[in-house]
Image (cartoon, helix red, strand yellow):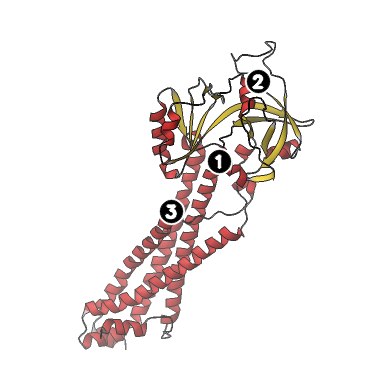
Amino acid sequence: MNTPFFIAKRITGLRSREGYSGPMVVVAISGIALGLAVMILSVGVVRGFRQTIREKIIGFGSHVRITEFAVGNSLESPPMKKDADFVPILLQEDKIKHIQTFAIKPGIIKTDEEIQGVIFKGAGKDFNWHFFEQNLKDGTLPRYTEDSLNISTDIVISNEIAKKLRVGVNDTLVSFFINRAGERNPDFTSPQRPPRKFRIAAIYETGLSDFDEKFILCDINVIRDLNNWFFDKISGYEVLINRFDDLQEVSDYADMAAGFQYKVENVRQLNRAIFDWLEQQDINVIIIITLMLTVGVMGMISALLILILERVQMIGILKTLGMNNQSIRKIFYMRALYILFTGILAGNIVGIGLGVMQQQTGIIKLDKESYYMDTVPVFFDVWGLLGINVLTLAFGLLALILPVFMATRITPLEAIRTD
């Protein structure tokens, strides 16, 4: 019979009621479970927040944007050919999911009482509507065919713009456009083009006010017509990829495939301030993990010290009967591992359970104007969960060293004195 295992089994568990053993086991397990659950939820919420914001920013554009080089900081870029030579090369890359064309033009929309400066983004028949389908609030999204003889006047606006201008689906908006310097003007009399009328086909809402208050989707042929472009001209290409982790690799590949003639920018470069802010959230997670690990380790050490002190007489008797230090260490290692693994199991059940409940129900709400979303987002990554559990286990094992070492230092004579 394995004597250390037999003894450890008899004195380990929540059933022990001698002295402070039972309550201390409960306290130690609860401390580990609570700390692990808080770490799991903290990492899940921060990852969910980052992913949600990131997906919304990408939804307004793409992972990688390819345009002609432009002079100055104008929102509009020079036109480029629709069927560029590098597009088939990019489509051969497995990491690239979709490539779509776009065109951009600033404008001013007006109602009888309100006025708003916006950016019109022209979408073609290859436009990926998935993001706007997820954030559709009212109406039906149009499908632009790029028919040069039948330019659609349907547009998609944000709920924020709709509230400011007090309009809804099927209402009409009047928009004014200004030519860029040097752009050919059909009437040669004024830099301002005649106003255009549009019908609101759909209203979206993402919660990103910096984007919602600016972007309006329209037929790409509207932009072409306003700029007097041929119908094979575009502002650029938007590249969507399968995994965000491949962003830099795909960006470098696109830069090489497009050549020096074109400007290749990824979403990090285009929105550097937002992504820097998102990365700063990792500091909060590190602080929380450090505090929880500290609390868990201190609780573990305290519990084991009390459990060992209560077994001083037992240790002395075992040593008198000839048990060596290694066997005594095994007894308390097994007892400590029971506490550690029970706490880890309970922490995972509580942390993951609460996270999944929030994912499914969205029970905890947020102020959308302040946090860009109406519920607390939670995202669990398998490797992230594994890393938290391994870190907790590693620090828990380190916490065993001092108490177990003290157990082996007890002599039979000291055990008799404590009687």
- Residue at image point 74% right, 35% down: 165
What secondary structure is marked by label 1? helix
For label 1, the residue is 59
Q: Is residue 342 above or below residue 1?
A: above
Image quadrant occupied by the N terminus: bottom left
| Callout 3 crowding tier (Cα within 10 Å): few <14, some 14–19, many ≥20 | some
Instruction: State which tag comes first along the sequence, 2 or 1.
Output: 1
Residue 340 x/y as whole percent: 38, 71
Q: Residue furthest top?
A: 188
* Visible residue check, residue 214: no
In the drawing, does residue 74 fall left or right of residue 186?
A: left
Residue placed under numbered mark 2 in the picture: 178
Q: Residue at x 27, y 77 (%)?
A: 330
Q: Secondary structure at mark 3?
A: helix
Q: Residue at x 60, y 54 (%)?
A: 375
Q: Amino acid at mark 1?
A: Gly
Residue in front for this viewpoint, 306 or 372: 372
Say if 364 sits above or below 32 in the image.
above
Q: Which residue is mark 3?
A: 286
Quarter of the image where one finds residue 155: top right
Where is residue 19 shown, x and y percent of the image?
42, 84
**The residue under label 2 is which amino acid type?**
Ile
Circle 3: residue type: Ile
